[in-house]
């Protein structure tokens, strides 16, 4: 139940002392700062039990604009309200299980930088697209718990939800059969099945035919650049090679986790997930 701020007392003040006390009590509730009338900062709003108006109004400028991005929902569907310093999400998988890792990172708002801790999400399904998020209603970062879901709509299901990134837990082969190769610089190889490798992995070759075999079979390790789910290049100039015929394998020597795209603004590039 609410009541008016100003009320006539049952008995009007009759002495100077009574009037002084009445005015003092009134001034406790309403003051004038030289430009505007200011109400008691503990004045309540009808549906609340005790809203601190000073704190509430500190989020707004005199022109009614939001003074801090913490006053706004963190997830958007099209614009960019924040930016990560780097994509923090990576994934590794074998034929049975997968794990997503989130590196420590920062998030830049218009008015501040927020730091988030590292974390892992284990026991996930291999060869599956996941969306990684955390709930941070106060936008303070720090030690948060990360979650992964296959339902993309969940990343916008809470105003305090921070969408960290998306990644696919692609299974990485140890040996891939080569079905084609280009006579170009650099040489690009095609594999019979998706290899699950990433740029930065190193491989060795065996059983390649002709000039490809002479240059690559057992001659060392080669760092690949991923060009597709079933293709990659190595830094070898094959422009003078005879055409590839058939045969050969590439064996992975090192693993580089597949990197997931950060999504602080709520934007997801589905083509990113589709390439795995």
Image: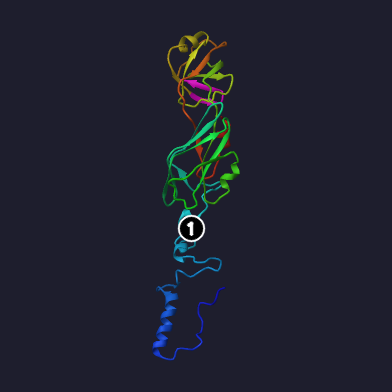
> Residue placed at 59% from the left, 38% from the top?
150
Q: Is residue 233 magenta?
A: yes
Describe the colour scheme in one phrase: rainbow
Q: Is residue 194 magenta?
A: no
Q: Nearer the viewer, residue 159 or 226?
A: 159
Judge whether residue 21 can be spotted in this image: yes
x, y (%) of residue 179? 58, 16
The quadrant holding residue 19 is: bottom left
In the rendered image, which residue does mark 1 sit on?
Answer: 66
> Residue placed at 46% from the left, 27% from the top?
256
Say left or right for 8 vs 21. right
Judge whether residue 183 can be spotted in this image: no
- Label 1 SS: loop
x, y (%) of residue 165? 51, 39
Quadrant in the picture for the N terminus: bottom right
Could you classify mark 1 by the number of other residues whose Cα lies within 10 Å: few (under 14), some (14-19), or many (20 or more)? some
Q: Is residue 262 above or below residue 244?
A: below
x, y (%) of residue 157? 58, 48
Q: Nearer the viewer, residue 178 or 8?
A: 8
Specify the principal SS of the magenta part. Answer: strand
Report the number of discs: 1
x, y (%) of residue 34? 40, 74
Residue segment shown in magenta: 225-234
Quadrant in the picture for the C terminus: top right
**Which residue is farthest bottom?**
14
């Amino acid at each position: 139940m609410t009541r008016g701020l100003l009320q006539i007392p049952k008995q009007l003040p009759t002495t100077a002392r009574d009037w002084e006390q009445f005015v003092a009590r009134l001034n406790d509730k309403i003051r004038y700062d030289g430009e505007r009338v200011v109400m008691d900062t503990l004045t309540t709003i009808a549906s609340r039990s005790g809203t601190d108006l000073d704190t509430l109004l500190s989020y707004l400028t005199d022109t009614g604009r939001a003074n801090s991005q913490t006053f706004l929902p963190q997830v958007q569907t099209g614009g960019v309200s924040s930016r990560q310093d780097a994509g923090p999400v990576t994934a590794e998988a074998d034929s049975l299980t997968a794990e997503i890792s989130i590196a420590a990172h920062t998030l830049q708002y218009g008015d501040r930088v927020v730091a988030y801790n590292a974390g892992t999400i284990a026991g996930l399904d291999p060869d599956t697209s996941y969306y990684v998020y955390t709930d941070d209603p106060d936008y303070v970062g720090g030690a948060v718990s990360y979650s992964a879901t296959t339902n993309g709509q969940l990343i916008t299901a809470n105003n305090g939800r921070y969408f960290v990134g998306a990644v696919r837990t692609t299974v990485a082969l140890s040996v891939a059969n080569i079905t084609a190769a280009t006579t170009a610089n650099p040489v690009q190889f095609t594999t019979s099945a998706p290899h699950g490798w990433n740029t930065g992995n190193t491989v060795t070759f065996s059983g390649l035919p002709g000039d490809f075999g002479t240059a690559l079979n057992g001659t060392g390790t080669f760092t690949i650049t991923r060009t597709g789910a079933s293709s990659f290049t190595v830094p070898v100039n094959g422009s003078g090679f005879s055409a590839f015929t058939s045969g050969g394998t590439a064996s992975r020597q090192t693993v580089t986790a597949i990197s997931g795209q950060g999504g602080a603004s709520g934007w997801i590039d589905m083509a990113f997930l589709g390439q795995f």
